[in-house]
Image (cartoon, helix red, strand yellow):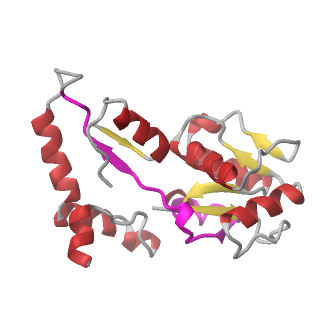
C-alpha cells in the first residue's frame, strides 16, 4: 500500500496497473504579512500572476514531492512558467515542507504549503496565510492498495483491513480530530466515500 498526495502521479500509478484504486488538508499560499505582491484574497491563478508580474520572491521545493507536483500544477493551470531571479528552487527542498516553510520565512518570501505544516509552525514564523479555500488547493492524501496481481508478496488482506479502518467512521473521526485541540482547527479533512455518504 502507498500513502501519497500527488493526484496526477497517483492516477498514472493506477492506470499502469501498479495499484488497484485511489481511496480518498489543503494547500495555502503563505507570504509576508505586508504582502508586497498584493495577493491576499485572490484566486490561486490571480495570485501566481501577481507574484510573477511583481517578481516577488517565491520559494519552490524543486523535488518530486506531492507538494511540489501540486505547486507546479497550479503554475500550469495558470498557463505560466516561473523563471527568473525571483523564483528560487531551494536546494534544501528535499528536507521537506517544514524545512521549506522555515526557509521561506527566513527569506520573507511566498510559497505554497500544506495547511497542516503551516499550523504546526505558525507560532515560530511571521508568514501569514494569504490565499486559501479554493478548489484547486485541495490536497487529497490518498491510500492506494498495491496490485497483488503484479506483486505476489503483497499481503493484500492486511492492506484492505487498514483501508477499511482508515475509511470507516472511527478512522475518519480520528483523522478529523487529530491535533485539533492543539492547533485550534483540523490539520486534515475527512473525505472517504463512507464518510461522504453519511454526511449526504
Residue at 86% over, 47% down = 86
Left or right for 168, reference 128: left
Q: Is residue 38 magenta?
A: no
Specify whether residue 33 is in view.
Answer: yes
x 53%, y 67%: residue: 135
Q: Position of residue 33 (x, y in %)?
A: 76, 71
Q: Is residue 107 above or below residue 54?
A: above
* The image quarter in which residue 125 lies: bottom right
169 on left or right of 12: left
139 inside magenta stretch: yes
At 74% from the left edge and 57% from the top edge, which residue is drawn? 110
- Which image quarter is the N terminus in? top left
**Number of numbered callouts drawn:** 0
- Viewport quadrant of the C terminus: bottom left
Is residue 31 visible in the rendered image? The answer is: no
Q: Is residue 6 above or below residue 31?
A: above
In the image, residue 60 above or below residue 39: above
- Residue at position x 59%, y 65% in the image: 122
What span is in magenta? Answer: 119-148
Question: Residue 24 location in percent, x, y?
Answer: 33, 55
Image quadrant in which you'd find residue 187:
bottom left
Q: Nearer the viewer, residue 130 or 80?
A: 80
The one of 55 and 182 positioned closer to us in this rendering: 55
Q: Is residue 49 left or right of residue 131?
A: right
Q: Position of residue 124 (x, y in %)?
A: 62, 61
Amino acid at each position: 500500500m502507498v500513502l501519497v498526495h500527488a493526484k496526477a502521479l497517483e492516477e498514472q500509478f493506477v492506470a499502469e496497473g501498479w495499484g488497484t484504486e485511489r481511496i480518498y488538508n489543503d494547500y495555502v499560499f503563505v507570504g509576508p504579512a505586508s504582502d508586497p505582491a498584493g495577493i491576499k484574497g485572490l484566486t490561486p491563478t490571480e495570485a501566481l500572476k501577481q507574484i510573477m508580474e511583481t517578481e516577488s520572491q517565491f520559494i519552490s521545493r524543486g523535488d518530486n514531492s506531492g507538494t511540489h507536483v501540486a505547486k507546479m500544477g497550479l503554475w500550469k493551470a495558470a498557463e505560466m512558467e516561473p523563471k527568473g531571479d525571483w523564483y528560487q528552487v531551494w536546494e534544501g527542498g528535499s528536507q521537506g515542507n517544514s524545512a521549506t516553510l522555515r526557509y521561506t520565512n527566513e527569506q520573507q518570501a511566498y510559497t505554497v504549503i500544506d495547511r497542516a505544516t503551516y499550523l504546526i509552525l505558525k507560532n515560530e514564523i511571521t508568514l501569514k496565510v494569504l490565499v486559501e479555500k479554493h478548489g484547486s488547493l485541495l490536497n487529497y492524501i490518498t491510500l492506494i492498495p498495491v496490485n497483488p496481481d503484479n506483486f505476489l508478496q503483497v499481503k493484500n488482506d492486511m492492506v484492505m483491513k487498514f483501508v477499511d479502518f482508515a475509511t470507516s467512521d472511527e478512522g475518519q473521526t480520528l483523522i478529523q480530530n487529530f491535533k485539533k485541540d492543539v492547533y485550534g482547527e483540523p490539520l486534515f479533512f475527512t473525505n472517504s466515500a463512507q464518510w461522504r455518504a453519511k454526511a449526504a
